[in-house]
Image: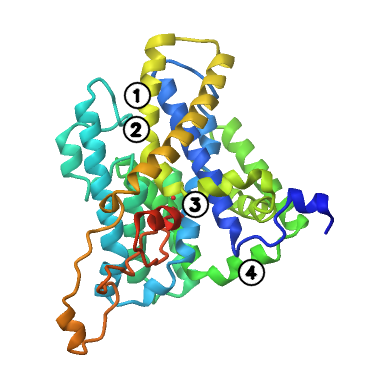
Amino acid sequence: MSISTYRWTVSEPRPRAWMNFAKGVAIAMVVLYHVTLYLQHAGIMGLPSRMKLVLELFPMPVFFLIAGLFGARAATWSLGNLWRRRLLPVLYLYIVWSVIRFGFYLLIPGLSGELGELPASNPISLALILIWPSSSYWFIYALAVFAFAAWALHKLPPVVHVVLAALLSSAVTAGLVNSGNIGWNRVGALYVFYAFGVLYAPRVFDAVAKVSVQRTLLAAAALAASAAILFLLPTRWVPFLVLLGQASAVALGILLSAYLARLRMLSFVSTMGAESLQIYLLHLFVIVPVAGLLGLALGGVHRGVGIAIQFGLVAFAIVASLLLSKLTTKVRWLYVPPIIKRKRATAAAGVPASAGTTDSVGTTDAPTNPDGRTTAVTTPRTIARDKEIST
């Protein structure tokens, strides 16, 4: 390899580096999606509103696919083990940040944390979070639902499991099934990607290892066709069309990530991917008040100016979220359930350590990564480094 090539690329990228890169692209698209919604709500028009149909194709499907890749082992655990090592940590995270969100909007009057649902400051919205997930943190809730569903259905033949999930997804995206709640609708629409990751992880890793220009171009053609149809025509009601667009977007995104993760100049994308959970949890606390202030200060502006404001706010929200992440991850309980230390007498008696319990120094194998990976955590900085959405 020449010196010039070495300067531009990483000669030996980290194993499965494509995951962080794909998540970095996905979280940037999530932030763009929310910036678009809240600026429009404030009267600042940027990208066409139908653009959200395209922005919905990649981020959440790829996050759930990656989460599923690390969920196969959990499907064979006992229910108690599943609760300690998967469900409890994720539900804890969901509840803690839902309470923080409620307090934020309660203390700052005039802000609307939800568009089209109960106001975020409404106590009813907080009381119902375990049965009526909020549109802010529904993703965290979905991870718990998906982990339990994959565990409960793990004895089904993989093909049957995925086909049933695909039918449910198509029914939701085509409007044939509607729960009346954004969170539950997206749970139904996106479980297929988590299930596919759980059941076909080896095939996904093998496909990425055998990435080729031909496969990448094929995925690009499928995405271009489906995205054009969805964007230009009112065809969302067509069964399986959205699912096809999502699947092709995920395939293309993963294949491109396998190439682009090697570029040094794009290393910041992988950094965003590694911190994607924190960005996901924190970015609305930046976007909502800033969008409100911009709406009051500027009112209606030319669409070109609106687009510039849109992308400027995306960059600001990501940087601000990363800075807030450095502060919040110093407070361990914001991300990880309080550890109940076992008595030393238990260890002295020769009782074997069970999964999900802690040792004398307070480490735990409960997953701090909602993508399903279990990580022993001893310091808040380790939490910040290891925690990944796969948000």
Q: Nearer the viewer, mark 3 or mark 4?
A: 3
Relative to 194, residue 98 above or below:
above
Relative to 70, residue 40 above or below:
above
- What type is the residue that disc 4 sits on? Asp
User: Which residue was labeled with disc 3?
Assistant: 274
Q: Nearer the viewer, residue 70 or 337?
A: 337
Residue 166 showing in the rendered view: no
**Which percent across, then down, holds residue 250?**
58, 52
The earlier-in-sequence mark between 3 and 4 is 4
Q: How is the image coloured?
A: rainbow
User: Which residue was labeled with disc 2?
Assistant: 285
Tags 4 and 2 in contact by the CB under 8 Å rule?
A: no
Separation (CA) of disc 4 from disc 2: 39 Å
Secondary structure under tag 3 reads helix
Tags 2 and 3 in contact by the CB under 8 Å rule?
A: no
- What type is the residue that disc 3 sits on? Ala
- Residue at 54% across / 48% down in the picture? 271
Question: Around disc 2, counting alpha carbons within 10 Å, would you say few (fewer than 14), some (14 to 19), or many (20 or more)?
Answer: some
Question: Around disc 4, counting alpha carbons within 10 Å, would you say few (fewer than 14), some (14 to 19), or many (20 or more)?
Answer: few
User: Which residue was labeled with disc 1?
Assistant: 289
Q: How many circles with numbers are drawn on the protein?
A: 4
Instruction: Please state if 233 lies on the left or on the right of 3 as rendered.
Output: left
Separation (CA) of disc 1 from disc 3: 26 Å
Circle on res. 206: 4
Q: Nearer the viewer, mark 1 or mark 3?
A: 3
Separation (CA) of disc 2 from disc 1: 7 Å
